[in-house]
Amino acid sequence: MKKIILKSTFMLLALSLLTFTSCSDDDENTTGNSVTYDLSERSNSGVSGTVEFVELTDGQVQIELDLSGTLNGNTHPAHVHMNSAAFGGGILISLDPVDGSTGSSVTIVSTKDDGSSFDFSMVENLDAYVNVHKSASELDVVVAQGDIGSNLLTGEETTYNLNTVDIAGIDGTITFKERKNNFTLAVIELNGTPDGGMHPAHIHMNSAAETGGIWYSFNPVDGSSGVSNSDIRATDGGMALTYNDVITVDGYVNVHLSATELGTIVAQGDIGVNELTGESITYTLDEKDVAGISGEIKFEERKNGSILATIQLVGTPNGGMHPAHIHENDAATGGPIAVTFNPVVGDTGISKTTIRNLDDGSSFNYTSISSFNGYVNVHLSATELGTIVAQGNIGIN
C-alpha cells in the first residue's frame, strides 16, 4: 500500500530528538516528499517490511529498506527490477545490501544502473518491483518482494470460480486485479493440487462448453502452494490488453495436470462475458423408450445474453453418447431440429452446450427460452435416433 507522508514542523522537531546512524536520514536534507510500499514475505523466509523512497533537497532519492525477520550475520542483496514481480525483469537500480542484524539498508541515488537519470518524480509511475535476496550466492531465493510505482493495485478486482473437472478434489478461483498502469495481476488459487506438480494454465477463447484456442498463457500453478501469479499485458499473439479487456473477454480458463498431460484438465471456469448471471430455467426430461433414464435440462443466462444449457440424466449406460436437440413445436406434435446440443456422455449423464443462435443462424438468447415453442429429445445413439431415452416440453409448452 502506498502512502504519502507530509512531515509537519511538529514531526521535524520530534524527529530531531532521535539519534540517526546517517546524516542522510536527517529531515533537514529532505523535501518532505516520500512514498512507501510493502514488501511481502517470499520463500517462507519470515522476512517482510517496507521500501520507502524519500526526496532529498539536492534532487537525489534516498531508498530505505526496513525489514523484520532478518538474522544477525546475514547480508541480503536488494534491487529495484523492471516490470512487475509476476512478469519479472532486469535490474533497474542496485541497492545497498540489507544488514541482517538491523534489517535496514539506505541507498542514495540520482541515476539508474544504466546511467540514466532518476529522480523522485519518476517513482509513482515506475514500472518496477523490489526484490530482497537470501544472499549473494543465493540470488535465486527471494526473501521479500513487492510491486512499486505503476504496478500498485487499484483495489478493483474480479473473481471467478474454477471447478473440478477430471481429477476429484481440485478446485479454486482466479482473481484478476487492476494495476495503476491498467495492466492486470492474475492470481490462480487452487485446493488439492499435488506437491511438486506444475500445472499449465491458459485463457481460451469462447466458453468452456464450446472450447477454443489459447488466448493467454499464465505462469504455471505451483502444486505445492496451489498458486500462480501472472502479469497480463498482452495476448500470446501480442495484442495489448487492459484490465477491462480481460474481465470482458469471451473466454474460459483451463488448468491442466502437467505439460505432458494437457488433455487432463484439473480445474476450469468461464470468465468475462461468459460468467453466469444467476438467472436460470429448468425443465423436466421424462423417461421415454428406455426404462430408467430421465432427468432435467437447465438453461442459465450468461452476462452476454447467451445460454449455458446443461442436461443431467440418471440411468445412462457407461460408454454411451446420446445426441440431443431442441425441436420446434411440442413433443406430441413433433417438429424439426432447432438447436443441436453437445451429446450427453453416458458415463456422467451430462451435456453442456453454449447456445448463441439457432442452428439456422437466427438469433436465440436467454430471453427467447420462456416464449419458445419447443421440446427436447435425447436419443439413444447417433445410429439409433428413433429411440428417445428422455423427452420434455420447454418454453410456452
Image (cartoon, helix red, strand yellow):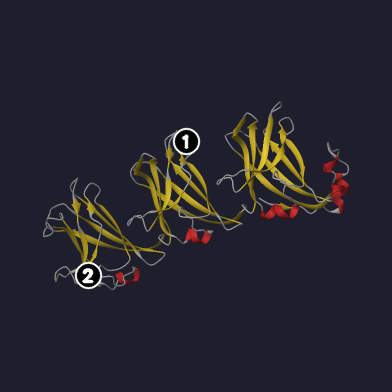
Residue 352: x, y in percent? 29, 56
Q: Is residue 127 above or below residue 396?
A: above
Residue kind at label 2, given as amino acid type: Gly
Residue drawn where x is 18% and y is 70% of the image: 330
49 or 357: nearer the viewer = 357
**Is residue 245 left or right of 68 when viewed as pictured?**
left
Quarter occupied by residue 380: bottom left
**Is residue 336 left or right of 39 when viewed as pictured?**
left
Residue 244: x, y in percent? 52, 61
Mark-to-mark CA distance, 1 and 2: 50 Å
Residue drawn where x is 25% and y is 72% of the image: 396
**Is residue 349 left or right of 289 when viewed as pictured?**
right
Residue 345: x, y in percent? 23, 50
Label located before the other in sequence (1 or 2): 1
Q: Secondary structure at mark 1?
A: loop
Residue drawn where x is 47% and y is 50% of the image: 174
Q: Residue furthest top?
A: 73
Task: Please identify the quadrant where the C terminus is shown.
Answer: bottom left
Q: Secondary structure at mark 2?
A: strand
Residue drawn where x is 88% and y is 48% of the image: 13
Is label 1 or label 2 in front? Answer: 1
Q: Are marks 1 and 2 in contact (CB under 8 Å)?
A: no
Q: What residue is disc 2 on?
A: 374
